[in-house]
Amino acid sequence: MKRCTCWQRGSGNYQSIVKVLSIYNAYNMIMAAVKRVPVSKTVWKKLGEMKGAGQTYDDLLEEMIERVKKARLEEDVKMWESCPDSEYVSLSEIKD
């Protein structure tokens, strides 16, 4: 933010007029959310091969994250389903 003091002549006297100029750099506002993730050339090439036409790397990584989250949830459900009922404790049996 920059402050500029200007003088204006009025009624035979000079009056101070203070103007405040707010300058926003759109590049910094957008780029503040952008992070760099260093990867090897091999990984970069593999990511490029996985990326679809018109798909951004952000979209690709988001898709990959969702796939991993889903796979982990499926693994957890399989593990829970494989546990014998005797290992389960109902919430009403749990005391603080």
Image (tube, rainbow, N blue to C red):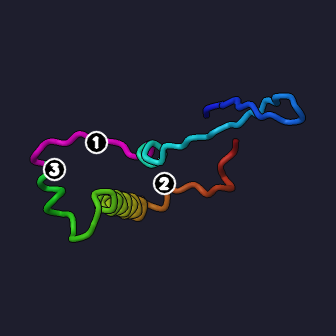
Q: Nearer the viewer, residue 5 or 44?
A: 5
Going by the picture, which residue comes out furthest to the right?
11
Instruction: Report x, y in % for residue 52.
Output: 21, 69
Magenta stretch mostly in which secondary structure?
loop
Task: Tell whether 3 sits left or right of 55.
Answer: right
Q: Secondary structure at mark 2?
A: helix
> What amino acid type is highlighted by mark number 2?
Glu
| Residue 87 visible in the displayed image | yes
Q: Nearer the viewer, residue 19 or 82?
A: 19
Residue interval drawn in magenta:
32-42
Instruction: Report x, y in % for residue 19.
Output: 71, 37
Task: Tell whether 30 sits left or right of 3.
Answer: left
According to the picture, the residue beneath numbered tag 3 turns out to be 44
> What amino acid type is highlighted by mark number 1?
Val
> What amino acid type is highlighted by mark number 3?
Trp
According to the picture, the residue beneath numbered tag 2 turns out to be 87
Instruction: Report x, y in % for residue 56.
Output: 29, 61
Q: Is residue 84 above or below residue 29?
A: below
First-in-chain label (1 vs 2): 1
Q: Quadrant of residue 40?
A: top left
For label 2, the crowd category at 10 Å Cα-Cα, with few meaning under 14, some 14 to 19 and many 20 or more, is few
Give the residue displayed 31% in from the left and 41% down from the top: 36
Q: Secondary structure at mark 1?
A: loop
Q: How many angstroms separate mark 1 from mark 2 (CA)?
A: 42 Å
